[in-house]
Amino acid sequence: MTPAQLLRTVLRAVRRVADAGAPGGAASGAPAALPERITVGRPPRPGCGDYATNAALRLAAATGRPARSVAEELREALVREEGIAGVTVAGPGFLNITVAGAARASLVAELAGRDDEGLVAASTDPASDARRWFGATGGRVSYEQRESNPLFLVQYAHARARALLRGARDLGFGPEAGAGGHAYGDPRELALVGALAECERIAGLDDPGRLARALEEAADALLSIHGCVLPVGERKPEAAHRARLALAQAAGAVLAGGLSRLGVTAPAHV
């Protein structure tokens, strides 16, 4: 479930709650006005679900109703939606949403299925890439190839994703999102899935600086799991390896797409 898909789900729930609370209720036939600037994004802290939304606060402001009461009604509406495993109310009325494992696997499958071959470069021009990254972020131009350099970190993570796919082919297996019911529930997997979803959300905002920062976070998250994607030693590939490989493939596709938006090359090797 992408942020855009979840936003549509949230808006449906907002419409139902707004109509039910309008004068005469839903039976009046007069739809209530929906509030503006409803957002869906990452929660402010780890462990608070997959997504957070300000929908209840916006609807409460538009209707003059207590935010906590509106939040509880929205929570009850959302937990009945397919793909949502749980919703909690936080603070004055924020909603933290946890999606079902199958919904995470669906997002991974969608991202991993993108054809990014045309975005991958056999060779790069470090000076040109650094200038374009600087233009997008306002940061310091740097050609140093070290992980403390954000541009190199993102390019290196992309190259690692491609290397994992090559290594898996050599071992005779391929990516399979959600293989064996894998729900991507490990904290490191959750962090990467969340970072990729955030990249998807920010990519549509025409904000190169924020996109660059999101790509850096996704690169960090990918590098935190890349050591457990392939089997070690004489171990045979298992369902978890196929599922994590799909997650790495999804990360590579998102990083390639983001780098391309910034005018920077996505290298196959570093």
Image (cartoon, helix red, strand yellow):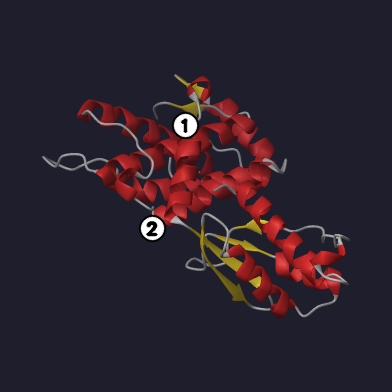
- On screen, 167 above or below 51? above
Q: Position of residue 261 (x, y in %)?
A: 63, 32
Front position in the image: 33 or 25: 25
Q: Earlier in the sequence, mark 2 or mark 1?
A: 1
The three-letter amino acid code for the residue at tag 1 is Gly
Q: Position of residue 156 (x, y in %)?
A: 43, 37
The three-letter amino acid code for the residue at tag 2 is Gly
Judging from the image, what secondary structure is the residue with disc 1 in? loop
Judging from the image, what secondary structure is the residue with disc 2 in? loop
Front position in the image: 169 or 106: 106
How packed is label 1: few (under 14 Cα within 10 Å), some, or many (20 or more)?
some
Residue placed under numbered mark 1 in the picture: 113
Front position in the image: 216 or 161: 161
For the point 72% across and 69% down, which residue is it?
56
**Residue 147 visible in this rendered orientation of the protein:** yes
How packed is label 2: few (under 14 Cα within 10 Å), some, or many (20 or more)?
few
Task: Please give the label number shown on residue 185.
Answer: 2
Quadrant housing the C terminus: top left
Task: Please give the label number shown on residue 270.
Answer: none
Q: Position of residue 262 (x, y in %)?
A: 63, 33
Taking the image as shown, residue 124 lies to the left or right of residue 9, namely left
Taking the image as shown, residue 156 lies to the left or right of residue 168, namely right
- On screen, 173 above or below 100? above
**Residue 144 visible in this rendered orientation of the protein:** no
Q: Position of residue 208 (x, y in %)?
A: 68, 41
